[in-house]
Each structure stands twice: as structure tokens, then as C-alpha cells.
């Protein structure tokens, strides 16, 4: 399935279930930072996320899924577990976005055999 469709579906689901989305957090949007601040943040996020946070978030999500599957005995416990996973995914998605921007926006353009590609 197309990544954009999945992102819109996740955003709609979050809204319907009463959760925030990344678009709701004005303070974290690119427009509020200068290019230099944005570049520094994206670079810092990429380093920290890839080195430490990404594997921790994946582990937390996996363990929470296991907890829901093995121990949840009520709808309330399942809903709470799913909310926990949603929060972890919001953090993961924001860092994924920062890394993606860092890789695409701030990397030098590659030059091929015949100049810039």
C-alpha cells in the first residue's frame, strides 16, 4: 500500500479515536525554525535516533503488543495498551520524519559522470 495512504489512514484513525497527530503540534513544525536551527535539529535527531532511540522504541512497541496479547483481560486494558503503542509510534514517526528530512534536504547533491544528477 502507498505510504501516503497509510499515513493519512493512521492520522484519520488517531483523530477518530481522540488522539493527537504530528500535524497538531505546531511547535515542532519546520516553519517555526530557521534553516540553521532546523538543520542542526535534524542532524542531532538522526544521530540520536539511529544510534539509540529507534531500537528502544521498537522494543517497547513489541513488548507492549505482547503484553496486550498475553495479559489483557478487559477492553480497558487493551485500549490503554493500544494508546501506549500510539504514543510510541508518534515519537517514532516524528524521528523518522526528521531523519528523512536530514538525509534528503541536507545531504550534498551527488554528481554523476556527467555532472549533477
Image: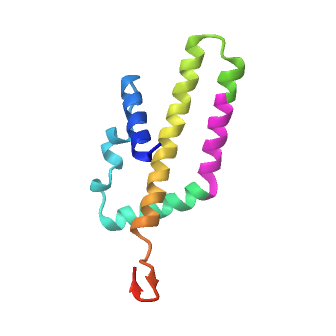
Q: Give me the residue at 40% from left, 41% from top.
A: 5
Residue 70, compared with residue 102, is above or below; it is: above
Q: Taken as a whole, is the magenta stretch helix, strand or loop?
A: helix
Examine the image and state in which quarter residue 63 appears: top right
Image height of 56 relative to 74, above or below: below
> Where is residue 6 drawn, in percent x and y?
44, 40
| Residue 28 as seen in the image, left or right of residue 1 | left
Above or below: residue 91 compared with residue 115? above
Taking the image as shown, residue 116 lies to the left or right of residue 78, namely left
Q: Quadrant of the C terminus?
A: bottom left
- Residue 16 is inside the magenta segment: no
At x 50% / y 32%, what residue is drawn? 86
| Residue 23 position in % (x across, y down) | 33, 41
Residue drawn at 55 percent across, 29 percent down = 84
Region rendered in magenta: 51-65
Q: Name which residue lies at 64% across and 30% down.
A: 64
Question: How far across and how far down the image is residue 24, in percent?
Answer: 32, 38
Residue 55 among magenta residues: yes
Amino acid at each position: 500500500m502507498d505510504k501516503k495512504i497509510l499515513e493519512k489512514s493512521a492520522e484519520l484513525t488517531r483523530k477518530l479515536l481522540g488522539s493527537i497527530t504530528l500535524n497538531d503540534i505546531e511547535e515542532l513544525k519546520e516553519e517555526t525554525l530557521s534553516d540553521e536551527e532546523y538543520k542542526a535539529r535534524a542532524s542531532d535527531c538522526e544521530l540520536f535516533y539511529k544510534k539509540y532511540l529507534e531500537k528502544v522504541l521498537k522494543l517497547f512497541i513489541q513488548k507492549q503488543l505482547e503484553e496486550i496479547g498475553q495479559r489483557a483481560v478487559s477492553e480497558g486494558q487493551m485500549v490503554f495498551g493500544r494508546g501506549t503503542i500510539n504514543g510510541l509510534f508518534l515519537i517514532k514517526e516524528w524521528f523518522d520524519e526528521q531523519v528523512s528530512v536530514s538525509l534528503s534536504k541536507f545531504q550534498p547533491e551527488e554528481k554523476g559522470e556527467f555532472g549533477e544528477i
